[in-house]
Amino acid sequence: MIDYIKGSVAEINPTEVVIDCGGVGYSMLISLQTYEAIKDLKEAKVYIHHHLREDDEEFFGFATKDERQIFRLLISVSGIGVGSARMMLSAMSTEEIQDAILSENIAKIKSVKGIGAKSAQRVILELKDKIVKGEGSVSGSLPVSGANDNAEQAGTALVLLGFSKPNVHKAVNAILAKNPGASVEDIIKDALKIL
C-alpha cells in the first residue's frame, strides 16, 4: 500500500496534482485545502488514499495525515462517497469539520454542496464518538503543558494502547504536576493507575 508520494510538482490545479517521482508522474485528486498547502511548492510530500472500484482506480492526495484521516472517516459514513468527502474538505478545513461534528452543527455540514440534512445528521451520529476518541487526528502531538520528550513518548504509547487523547492529556498533566522529571516508564505506570 502506498502511504505517500514525494517528488517535484509537475502540474497542479485546484482539483488535481501530478507529482513526478523518479520519472513517473502520479496524478492525484486533491481538495482545495491541499491545493492551498502545496500550490507554491516545487517539491511536495502528498499522503495517498488509494480508492479502488470495479471500473475505476483513483489516487486522492492530501497535504497532511490528519486531512487524509478525516477523509477516510467521512467515506466510512453510509451515503458519503469520495466526491462528497473531497467537497467537504474543499469547503472547510480539517479542524472546522471536526468542530462542526463535535458541536453537532448540522447547518454547517449541510452547507456543503451535495450534503443534505440526513447525510449531515448521519456524519455527526457516526463520527462524533470517533473524533472524541482522537481518530480524526493522527499527526498532532499531545498537548501536554510543560511538554517534554518523556511526556510525549508516554502519551503516544498510552494512545496506542487505546486510551483517548483527552484522557491521556489529563493523566499525563496530573503526573507531571507532581513529578516534572518523571521517566517515560514512570509516566506510563502512573497513568495506567489513573486511566
Image (cartoon, grey):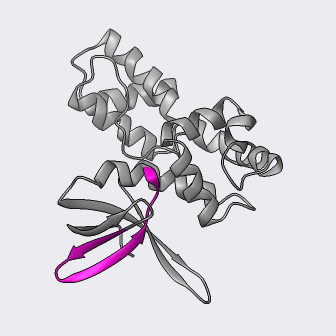
Residue 173 drawn at (x, y percent): 38, 18
Main SS of residues in magenta: strand
Q: Residue at x 42, y 59 (%)?
A: 14
Please report the bounds of the magenta region as a residue range: 17-32
- Residue 13 as seen in the image, left or right of residue 84: left
- What residue is shown at x 56% (from left), y 85% (from top)? 56
Left-right relation of 60 to 128: left
The location of residue 88, given as percent across then percent down, is: 59, 50
Single out the residue that lies furthest toward the bottom. Answer: 55
Q: Is residue 35 above or below residue 13?
A: above
Does residue 64 appear in this view? no
In front of the other: 19 or 150: 19
Above or below, 117 relative to 87: above
| Residue 99 belongs to the span the image colors magenta | no
Q: Residue furthest front?
A: 13
Residue that appears at 67% across and 29% down:
103
| Residue 158 placement, left or right of 41 | right
